Image: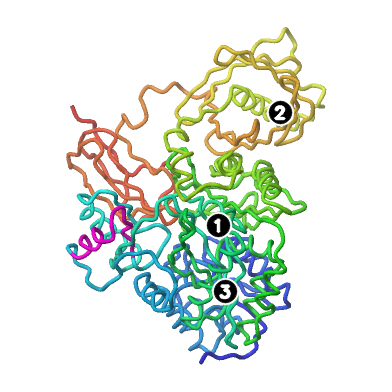
Amino acid sequence: MPNMKRFSKVLIANRGEIAVRVIRGAQAQGYRTVAVYSDADAGALHVRNADEAVCIGPAPAKDSYLVIDKIIAAAKTSGADAIHPGYGFLSERADFAQAVQDAGLVFIGPDPASINAMGNKSASKRLMLAAGVPCVPGYQGDDQTDATLIAEAVKAGLPVMVKAAAGGGGRGMRLVHDEALLAEAIASARSEAANAFGSGQLLIEKAVIDARHVEIQVFGDRHGNVVHLGERDCSIQRRNQKVVEEAPSPAVNADLRERMGAAAVAAAKAVNYVGAGTVEFLLAKDGAFYFLEMNTRLQVEHPVTELVYGVDLVAWQLKIAQGERLPMTQDEILENAFGHAIEVRLCSEDPRQNYLPQTGDVLLWDAPSGDGLRVDSYLETGRPISPHYDSMQAKLIAWGEDRETARTRLLKLVRDTALLGVASNKDYLAAILATDVFASGDFSTAFVGRHFSQDALAAAQPSARQWLLAAVALYLDDAQRLAAEHGLGSEMLGWHSSHESPVAFSLRRGSRDLALEVDASGGKRFRAVIGGATVEIEISAMQPGAFRYLSEGVQGSARYARGRGDALWLMADGATECFIDRSYAPAETTAAGSDGRITAHSDGKIVAVLVQPGDTVTKGQTLAVLEAMKMEFQLAAPLAGVVEAVSVAAGDQVKARQLLVQMTPGD
């Protein structure tokens, strides 16, 4: 039985937005807080918000946030008597929970036995079947031979899901429609699972096509009480990772909520669950639902439940961890529910480049506040986004009396939020929220694949007005800098000693270059011909980094920031774009990659180097593997040739655009 002593100082064994959220929640309840941080996070918001902070090692998580002994030592050093794990990192590690309890500290989460029971999908599924919880038909046995897995998949009936028994996040998971592809899928899933989770154990599940992903928030105390706080719909997913979450689900009525809630409570009771947890289900079109897994921690998407049910789940965790009873009964919880809440995950990734993770310095971070709005983040202007951690940087959440109010509020919040300096999925999130399909509430986990194909995302281009706005931003920024340096008044902006002449700009966005001549009348009126169309903009107000403009009778606003390498980040005309100012750049004589230079596409760590000088390689052959933000990327040869030099080795940290391999093109 764990130590149930009272505590007064909580160490948060995490970083980023969840550390900030838990610190503020604990402080609001009167607790002192301790942050832990790696060298990369020394000046981060969670460190400054906590009452105390302890450095636990180098930037890589394996050397800091994932080292149990360092976390325990930090608690002892600071005098913390309880540890909150947040989510991710060590939050679902039974050995961590046990180590905390063995050290005489309070673990703010479930007991190690409960974590263990639900930590393996195969074992937990067997438990759920015994407890009468509906499960997807399939195989979760110990015989892991290919022949048995293939036979069980055929028996379940294709299509099937081949899934890693340990871990999650979409890794080690394959959807198979064709029996002939089963062996390949099993081998691939097993290898990925072994690398990601240290276990290649697999299970087979009948694929529930066009299902919704619906999860139930549960809470248990040490007095035998377990309740649920309704459901969250997490069906908008990419690569089995959640993008949009909402409560309640548009597909769940009161009767279904009662049945799913009862199943989730039964699942929690089967493992004597204490604290906050989430039971995840697949909801089929016919209303049948099936157990997927249980997450034995606070979820990323917990804010939507808090807004709908009017509760603070972190405050509940703190109470339960000290042996108190649940603050509300099941009836009180359901009676308290009101309205609708939707959350999106803002990630530093580029959807147009197959969601490639992005790192760098944040040149501008500004998220609005207001009625029904909530932003959970750790981002700050001037602070870097590190390659060592997850790509999720913030959660944007909106509540409304009904779903449509919540949706429209969130759409405006997303569109008005400024993140400049690092590419993000902000515009992608806004596009999802704006679709008629999402507004209807009638969708499934197939939504992203059907409505946001990679080809369509990659083909997106800035509008003609955005190209001109980028040129205007460069013009105004240069003019304002010049005025500041020489003490000139604003009335001198755009002054000429002779007749005005067009200003030439050469801009690049992605792989597209555009040369344009801009007529700048008095520094306030701008006109250019782009794609055969004449675009005109008049500046009505300006300040450093922002201006208002009039175009085609409509006023708009723009925000911008200058970055490294002649980059201009622009938020205007309904989108955020990065343009490269090549107006004074020398002409390029070769196409990208044709010179045999293989560079890093982002900050990260070299996992493997597969070639050495003198090797002959073919076009498309993998030369090195780069890890960035928990994802691995194969860096391939852009052409056939001979490796001339290798500049890195496995384990090296590299910066974006750093030279990794130099090739001599072949004949």
Left or right, 258 with reference to 63: right
SS for tag 1? Answer: strand
Q: 10 Å neighbourhood of mark 1: few (<14), some, or many (≥20)? A: many
- Upstream in the sequence, badge 3 or badge 1? 1
Left/right placement of residue 432 relative to residue 159 reads right
> Can you identify the residue that label 2 sits on?
482
- Residue count near mark 3 (Cα–Cα under 10 Å), binned few <14, some 14–19, many ≥20: many
Residue under pointer 3? 276
Q: Nearer the viewer, residue 93 or 487?
A: 93
> Which tag is nearer the camera, tag 3 or tag 1?
1
> For this rendering, which residue is in front, 123 or 6?
123
Task: For marks 3 and 2, give the one nearer the viewer.
Answer: 3
Position in image of residue 372 (x %, y %): 74, 54
Please give the range of residues in magenta.
Answer: 148-164
Give the camera-side residue of 216 and 344.
Answer: 216
The residue that appears at 73% across and 8% down in the rendered structure is 498
- Which disc is residue 652 wearing? none
**Side of 165 relative to 439 (left or right):** left
For residue 358, side relative to residue 608 (left or right): right
